[in-house]
């Protein structure tokens, strides 16, 4: 798997998203992506209780630990590389979390318009 260039939605070098918990398609702490990342794990989001409950409701439980996969479970305040389509879905439902634009991969724009990401931005 060859990583796509590590650029963010601002056209700059991609910033780290989280190393604790360790996130990213490559589990490298950044929302790097590649052609094989069909979920486009490219949006660096700050978890909220509302979003975690929503994600669980729609079938992706991010809050329950899964030690067999080395997954500790997320809690409010954790940063995580979300699938771009899940972020857009949460936005459409009114429960999207805040995002770090500097840590959100440029490929997120294939799915989520920049204007929507900017509405939820932590940073500029």
Image (cartoon, rainbow, N blue to C red):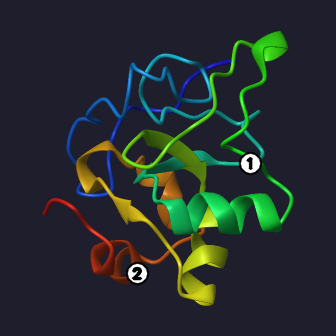
Seen from the viewer's position, the closer of residues 47 and 91 is: 47
Name the spot of residue 87 as percent of width and height, x first. Answer: 58, 66
Seen from the viewer's position, the closer of residues 97 and 84 is: 97
Work out how far the residue at label 2 is from the one at label 1, CA to CA, in angstroms: 19 Å
Rendered residue at 55%/24% (across/down): 3
Rendered residue at 23%/35% (across/down): 13
Closer to the chain start, of discs 2 and 1, is 1
Kindly indicate the quadrant of the structure image that contains residue 52. Answer: bottom right
> In this image, 122 relative to 109: left or right?
left
Q: Which residue is mark 1?
A: 39
Task: Give the answer, above or below, for where 75 lies relative to 119.
Answer: above
Q: Which residue is mark 2?
A: 116
> In this image, 28 relative to 114: left or right?
right
Name the spot of residue 6 as percent of width and height, x first. Answer: 38, 32
Secondary structure at numbered mark 1: loop
Name the spot of residue 5 as percent of width and height, x first. Answer: 42, 32
Rendered residue at 46%/59% (across/down): 48
Label at residue 76 = none
Secondary structure at numbered mark 2: helix
């Amino acid at each position: 798997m060859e990583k796509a260039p590590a650029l963010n939605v601002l056209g700059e070098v991609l910033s780290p998203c989280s190393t604790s918990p360790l996130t990213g398609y490559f589990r490298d702490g950044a929302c790097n992506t590649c052609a094989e990342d069909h979920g486009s794990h490219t949006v660096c989001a700050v978890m909220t209780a509302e979003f975690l409950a929503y994600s669980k409701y729609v079938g992706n439980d991010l809050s329950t630990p899964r030690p067999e996969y080395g997954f500790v479970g997320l809690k409010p305040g954790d940063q995580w590389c979300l699938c771009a389509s899940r972020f857009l879905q949460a936005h459409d439902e009114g429960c999207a979390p805040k995002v770090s634009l500097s840590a959100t991969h440029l490929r997120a724009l294939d799915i989520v318009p920049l204007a929507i990401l900017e509405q939820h931005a932590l940073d500029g």
